[in-house]
Amino acid sequence: MSTGLSLTEAVRALLLLFPRVVGRVKRAPIPDELKSVAIAPRHLSLFSYLQFDGPMPVNELAARLEVAPATVSLMIGDLSRKGLIERREDDADRRRTIVSIAPNRRAAIEKWIVAAAGAWQTALEPLTDEQRQTFVATLARFEEALNR
């Protein structure tokens, strides 16, 4: 007797579940310290890269986010004006701009990221390493299929 889901059952379950998940992510509370600067959940990936991997050039951030450098430059300009991101010239190549989280906003941004990370840790903790790898790869394939 199988305890798993057929492909059709799994697709149905995910079609019903995913809109709720996306809706919940969009309603994730932004720390009080950041509410006045009008940031949005779409900024979470950008801040996560900078938090986890440290300062980086705009082009590298754009590649990781899989968007055009001009798009990231616009986001960074907006976030910089709000005091959330700092920009500086790269000492090794003055044509490049290095971006980082503003030191006075780092704690609030980390608080926002930790909340999302905590939910993922709760969901992924019971899985084996191989199951986690399969889950992440499956989500990546889903996202790729949506882009076709």
Image (cartoon, grey):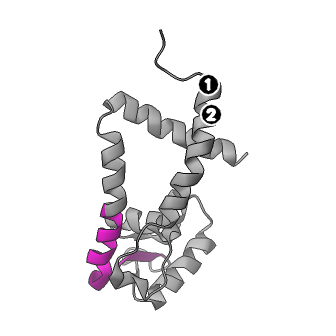
Mark 1 secondary-structure assignment = helix
Q: Residue at x 58, y 58 (%)?
A: 66
Image quadrant occupied by the C terminus: top right
Relative to 29, is 72 on the left or the right?
A: right
- The reply to whether callout 2 and callout 1 are in contact (CB within 8 Å) is yes
x%, y% of residue 130?
37, 28
Q: Can residue 42 be found in the magenta stretch?
A: no
Residue 47: mark in rendering: none
User: Dot 1, how many residues are within 10 Å of its Cα: few (below 14), some (14-19), or many (20+)?
Assistant: few
Q: Which residues are magenta?
A: 96-114
Which amino acid type is marked by label 2? Val
Q: Can residue 108 be found in the magenta stretch?
A: yes
Q: Provide the residue designation for mark 1.
A: 7
Q: Residue at x 54, y 23 (%)?
A: 5
Residues at marks 2 and 1, CA–CA distance in whole angstroms: 6 Å
Q: Provide the residue designation for mark 2.
A: 11
Comparing 85 with 89, the one in front is 85
